[in-house]
Amino acid sequence: MSVDLPRSDEMRPSRYIEKVSLITGETLDDEILPKQLLVRHHRDYHLVDIHARRMMSRVVRETGSPDEARRRMREVRRKGKKAAEVIAKLIGQSDVSKVSKALFGLKDKEYYFRFKKSPREEEDIHRQLTDLREEAGKQQAKLAEQDRLALRVLLTGGTGFVGKEIIWQAAYDDDIAEMIVVIRPRQIVDRKTGDVVRTVSPAERGERLLDRLWLEAPDVRSKFSFVEGDVEQPDLGIDPAVLEKLGPKVSHVVHCAASVAFDDPYEKSFRTNVLGTLNALRFSRALQSLPQSSFVAHVGIETSYIHGRKVTGLAREAQVVFPRNFYNNYYEATKAMASFETERFMLEEGLRVVQLCPAIVIGESRAGNNRGDAKVVNAPVNLFGRAQEALTSQEGSWMDRSKGAMLAKMACVFPADPTAELNLVPVDRVVAGILAALKTPAAVGERVHLAGDHRLTSHQIAQIVQEELGVKVKLAEPTLHRTVTLPIITKVLKKAKQEKIAHALDKLGTIFAGYSEWGQPIHQVGNDVRVLGLSKQRPNTEHVFRLLCRHNRFVQEFGRVRDLDEISRREKAWWDFMLGLEDETGMPVGAIPADKFHAMMADRLDTDSFTLLGSEEA
């Protein structure tokens, strides 16, 4: 089953993307550089360009119409080109484009990018997908016994945020008989010497993981096994002897391992997201080819942001088109490449595949628990919370308090257009979709967006943060903040010896630069209900974001509580408290207003010891 890793030249974007002339329509042989895939390579280089984007943002706020903003921008560009022609004639410059670029920041691209298409006809593809679905259905029927499926699932990424929720939900799913989790050993390193003190085996890591997920019953724990492996290695790095025993009985592979670092360089993102996916696909293809194989399907977890900066029209589930406004980061771009590799294995290799594409995943929908995750949306919420504590602190001298207040106000400036929309989805909805896909042979060949149908604007997010945390976040025009204000703020912070805050703000500006501007993509939803059979009532985005704020404030103390054992203990008390409150009020806790919730919490939860009042521990 072993295979060679792709060579470095196969990491080139041109493996998936081609450059096309806007003039002739012909494919160009020019090399495509990774940086050319990102929006930041094509803008923010000229003051006029920055000012134009500020004006577009203002038009959107005033008219509520992104299309009107684009119409006006086209008119401005037309007038700018006319002016450049006049000026070029006056100064004797034959190349008008140079004048346009120098004076107005206007660049005319003579090319565009597009993904390479499969040469196969649509009719052939449809016929093959129908066959794959029928094969999956027949294979799954063999597994059924006494009206119950006996699924044996191999999972990558089990120690991640989504992976932990998969394990937790699978523990209580009678159709899943066994789950094999691929996990790497963990080295404990002495911080002073850098020496490896000891190595924690996958089995030991797995037992600790089950403890932290509150899975205590022996019959539940026996459902899980943990094998050593690495998704960046052939055969997922699993020992051949172990693989020989596992291979014939695995019914599904759920590939959940990925890098969610939005600021990683191209090569690192590619190795994790594309090469890791290739290894998982090859692994699944080998399982499917085994004699007497139990294999039903490969379930790949992607992201709905594989569509990039698609600012016009729906980002459709069935089709991925290279975004004319490019990608925000290499995470998105390499995830799109991984999706095309998945399709290639399906169409060329006959691998039965389901693609699931979550939006921005946050804590679960009833209590906000996130198993200790502190990334993506959690990061700015934690920063705002710590900033508010600094603003209200009475400790230290007057000078120290004044300095702290000044720094806190800097930290509470966030680059976001008020109309920018984020598509947030709670992790339990995502995992419900993943487990449903395991039981739905008809999902083979489908791409499913696991996203919400109601998006929160930056303005709404700022309002909720103020209500829940008492923090007044000032929204700054993202282009101006990113290019002018943020460099000044970080420089001031560094001079004040606040390198950590400066780094945090700079990192957040980098991560959220593309997600906080107006004209965010609208992801089509429907396959989650039509194909997977999930509830038509999707989670209330406002409620789950309120829960995120409450969880980060009280359970994680804005990221200060890092010990996973302690977070697990706190989340169990929080879960019991929140479900009790839900039963008592008869409504979702996220729907309870902030002031009322805080009052109810004070009567029921001791936040110092983090135990329920009246319990033996308290």
Image: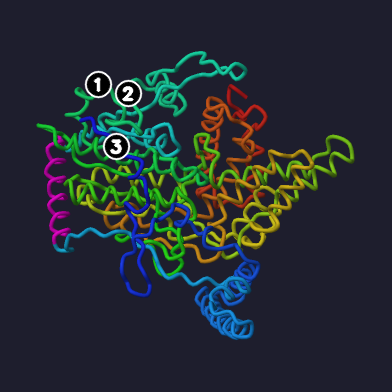
At mark 1, the secondary structure is helix
First of labels 3, 2 by sequence position: 2
* Prevalent SS, magenta region: helix
Residue at image point 68% right, 38% down: 500
Mark 1 is surrounded, within 10 Å at the Cα level, by few (under 14), some (14 to 19) or many (20 or more) other residues, namely: few
CA gap between label 3 and label 2 equals 16 Å
Quadrant location, the N terminus: top left
422 above or below 226? below
Give the colouring mode of the picture.
rainbow
Mark 2 is surrounded, within 10 Å at the Cα level, by few (under 14), some (14 to 19) or many (20 or more) other residues, namely: many
Q: Which residue is mark 3?
A: 279
Mark 3 is surrounded, within 10 Å at the Cα level, by few (under 14), some (14 to 19) or many (20 or more) other residues, namely: many
Q: Say whether marks 1 and 2 touch (CB < 8 Å).
A: yes
Residue at image point 43% right, 42% down: 267
- The residue stretch that appears in magenta: 124-145
Q: Nearer the viewer, residue 265 or 532?
A: 265
Does the magenta run of residues contain 116? no
Which three-letter amino acid code belongs to the residue tagged 3? Asn
In percent of width and height, residue 568 lies at 52, 29
